[in-house]
Image (spheres, grey):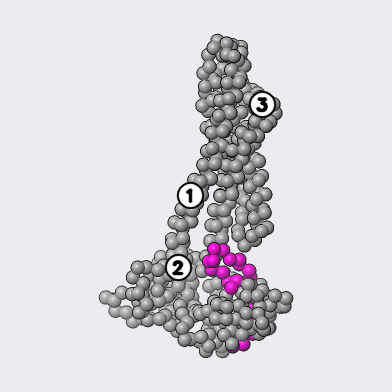
Amino acid sequence: MKRFIYELTESWKIAAAQMRANKTRSMLTALGVIIGIVAVTLMGTAITGIQIGFDQSMAVLGDDVLYVDQQPWIRRDDWWNFRSRKKIQTEYAETLNRMIGANEKSNLLLAVPAASWFRTVKNGENVVNNVYILGTTSDFTAISTVDCAKGRFFNELESRGGTDVVVIGYDIADALFPSDDPINKSVLINGHPFKVIGVNTRQGTFLGLFSWDSMVAIPLTSFKRYFTAKSESEIRVKVKDKTKLAEAKDELIGYMRRVRALPPEKANDFAINEQQAFKSTLDPVKNSIAVAGLFITGLSLFVGAIGIMNITFVSVKERTKEIGTRKALGARRRTILLQFLIESTALCLVGGLIGLLIAYVVCMGTRAAFPSFPIQFSVGLVVTSMIVSVMTGLVSGFAPAWSASRLDPVTALRYE
């Protein structure tokens, strides 16, 4: 064991001496690995960022909330069959809450009505078009993950009385009140004045997915008073235990069939949607991008490995006499093999460290330039990159190291 540790230590010293003696060649050789590690690290960071951004955007839907809608969120080939269905009425929420309350073992907690439409929001000369207007009740805070950064959400009295108050998203507040505090100011929604009582915390937008930053919420009673013509309604139902989402979904289907008075032989004329519907649709796309990206960036690392292998073969040829001399003096094959393996691994480690440093600088620059894109340079990614560097060095250096260890000492000493 002591001999092996000694050989290992000496091999690292020899590797360091070789890199110092051939600085330019070593740097050019490591360049392939540097580019490969930068590419792999940046791709890994981008994939992680996409996942984080996707999860953050989907968080507004809630992973413990079921949505009762007229149609499923995922478009199907027979979409026309859903258009003729009766609309979901916001009044269903009260009936559902009575059913939930009557069942002590219910997997459901609360049903909240919601209606939505797109309208223009103004404040003086500042205008935001196509704003998502949500009409709901004060119970909405029980199913939402979004809090108010300023002010508050409307209360039950305002909700039931249909007070013309509004809670606006961060981007809406920024666009309508660029240099003023929006609280207690008025905005016009489709020409009707609403008093701003709250501004939601900033979520950030990602890939055009859901975000409260560009939405506003008003009491459902007020919404019905102004926007009933073409609005879309749904019921949002919070689940007690999200690990029992399937059971909760079945229970909700049973309740909705009773609400709709559907006979046993008739199919459901409503859809129960959930966050997972979007995930199941987008995950294959996201995974395909990840596989394609890592494959393409992996090619650059493969090219770098070929460069390491090539230069290690050159090093073996240049030092053939040295190998013969060491073998004649009693050096084992294992010692020669270990020496060249460590030399190739050392080159890859140096390249990997430089590549990680460059990737980190690029990530920080990207974060500064595009703050909405979620960049996370994780420790796990650093460890993975270093493992990849070591494995690249071992694999690319094995063939040259093996050929060096198998050299006949007499032939090697005669080599010119």
Within-10-Å neighbours for mark 2: few <14, some 14–19, many 20+: many
Quarter of the image where one finds residue 281: bottom left
Three-letter amino acid code at the position of disc 3: Gln
Q: CA distance from mark 3 to mark 2?
A: 61 Å
N-terminal label among 3 and 2: 3
Earlier-in-chain disc, 2 versus 1: 2
The three-letter code of the residue at mark 2 reads Glu
Q: Is residue 17 magenta?
A: no
Q: Quadrant of residue 316?
A: top right
Disc marking residue 292: 1
Query: Is the C-beta separation of discs 3 and 2 under 8 Å?
Result: no
Which quadrant holds the N terminus? top right
Judge whether 287 appears above or below 315 on screen: below
Q: Quadrant of residue 325?
A: top right
Q: Secondary structure at mark 1?
A: helix
Can you name the residue that lies furthest to the right here?
179
The answer for how far apart the CA atoms under marks 1 and 3 are is 37 Å
Is residue 101 in view? no
Q: Is residue 110 visible?
A: yes
Between 363 and 264, which is closer to the camera in this rendering? 363
Observer-nearest of 7 and 83? 83
In percent of width and height, residue 8 lies at 62, 25
Indicate the secondary structure of the residue bearing disc 3: helix
Residue under label 2, please give it. Answer: 274
Q: Which residue is mark 3?
A: 18
Report the span colored magenta.
Answer: 192-214
Which residue: 62% across, 51% down? 377
Q: Residues within 10 Å of mark 1 (few under 14, many from 20)?
A: few
What residue is at 53 percent from the left and 85 percent from the top? 223
Q: Specify the quadrant that holds the C terminus.
A: top right
Q: Residue furthest front?
A: 416
